[in-house]
Image (cartoon, rainbow, N blue to C red):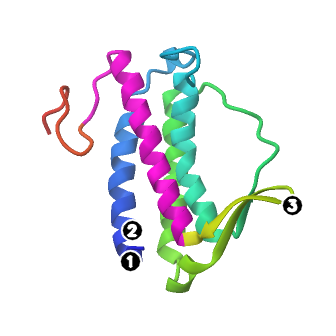
Amino acid sequence: MPSRDELIAEFDREMITTRRLLERVPAEHGEWKPHPKSFPLGHLAQLVAWMPGWITNAVTQSELQLGGFAGYTVETTEWLLATFDQNVREAKAALAAAQDGDWTAPWALKRGSMTLWSATRGEVVRTNLNHLVHHRGQLTVYLRLKDVPIPSIYGPTADERM
């Protein structure tokens, strides 16, 4: 696990890039999906906007109980950005407040009394950050297929030379 400061710096870099991608989500195409088995564009964007909140949970709680999920909706780009920004602020505050011993504390994903997955908080934070980057990558493909210019992520794109 990198130090808290290294993790926050990485988090900041990834969130800047993620926000730049969310800014380009065309809400009017929220129901569109590239394949019948794929998630709709609006749902994928909503997931990406929510995911920093998972990091807050991992750092501040000992478990996440699944259940009661009302489902995905298609929201405006402004809503996606406001939700993302709030989740990023809360996650960054949780990361900044974490102490060294917090990273080795156990955390569990549960449904009722059944544990679906457990790991240390540090592992969960890293997994959530990687999971967010994965879905951000999916979002770049969706946007490319809708001919939306893709921002620079780890280097130039066909649309942005940096």
- Please tell me which residue is depicted at 72% across the width and 64% down the height of the picture: 63
Calculate the distance from the C-alpha at mark 1 to the C-alpha at mark 3: 33 Å
* Mark carried by residue 71: none
Q: Percent position (x, y) of residue 146?
A: 38, 15
Pointer 1 with pointer 2, Cβ within 8 A: yes
- Quick one: label 1 or label 3, which is nearer the N terminus? 1
**Badge 2, how many Cα within 10 Å: few under 14, some, many 20+?**
some
Element at badge 1? loop
- Please tell me which residue is depicted at 34% across the width and 49% down the height of the picture: 16
Residue 73 in which image quadrant? top right
Element at badge 3? loop
Q: Percent position (x, y) of residue 68?
A: 82, 43
The image shows residue 5, relative to residue 125, as above or below, that is: below
In terms of depth relative to the viewer, which is nearer, 75 or 133? Answer: 133
The image shows residue 155, relative to residue 129, as above or below, that is: above
Q: Is residue 144 magenta?
A: yes
User: Which amino acid type is marked by label 3?
Assistant: Ser
- Quick one: label 3 or label 2, which is nearer the N terminus? 2
Residue named by callout 3: 113
Residue named by callout 2: 7
Q: Is residue 43 magenta?
A: no
